[in-house]
Image (tube, rainbow, N blue to C red):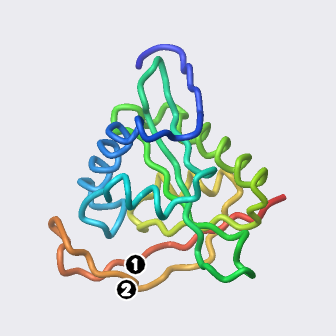
Amino acid sequence: MTGTNHLLSRRMEHADWPAVEAIWAAGIASGHSTFEPAPPSWEDFDATRHPQLRLVAKDHGNIVGWVAASPVSSRTVYRGVVEHSIYIAQEARGRGYGAQLLDAFVRRTEEEGIWTIQSNIFPENAASIALHQRHGFTVVGTRQRIGLMSYGPAAGSWRDTVLLERRAE
């Protein structure tokens, strides 16, 4: 994955799951991506993520990142509000893949009638917060002691998250 960036963003397929799961697991190992101790099964992921709002980014045939969204509520009044996650493979970070993938995702959400995208990011993940802010997300605030870590060196510790959101244009 050296040289020119040949990124292709497309809808995630079941066959992409092993690569998506590996990227997710590496993000989890960092301790700064999620409260979850492990990626879910494909079946759980598939059942809880909006089918049109799951994208992978490929460069030279390799999946280098993914993004997916879940509804924030089953209530009709919130049908246009989703929470998303974006992960870039460790070896692909800093090459603009996150920016391109987030751009493609934002366009897709607007095509799907989504008016608000939310994300909860650990404050220590400054790169992700900056990426989101460069793409029109604003910081709503810090959710203090919102979740308890169940794994890794921080197991048993309460963690804050920064809530960001982006409104459709």
Task: Work out whether 164 lies above or below 113.
Answer: below
The reply, left or right, for residue 94 in relation to residue 165 is left
The reply, left or right, for residue 26 in relation to residue 128 is left
**Residue named by callout 2:** 145
Residue at image position (36%, 64%) is: 34
> How far apart, in angstroms, are the residues tagged by discs 2 and 1?
5 Å
Q: Position of residue 95 (x, y in %)?
A: 49, 31
Q: Position of residue 28 (x, y in %)?
A: 29, 56
Q: Is the Cβ of the residue at disc 2 closer than 8 Å to that at disc 1?
A: yes
Helix, strand or loop status at disc 2: strand
Amino acid type, callout 2: Arg
In the picture, the disc for residue 160 is 1
Name the residue furthest right.
169
Name the residue furthest bottom.
145
Residue at image position (65%, 64%) is: 117
Task: Work out whether 167 lies above or below 25.
Answer: below
Upstream in the sequence, badge 2 or badge 1? Answer: 2
Mark 1: few/some/many CA within 10 Å (<14, 14-19, 20+)? some
Residue at image position (41%, 19%) is: 1
Amino acid type, callout 1: Asp
Count of numbered badges drawn on the protein: 2
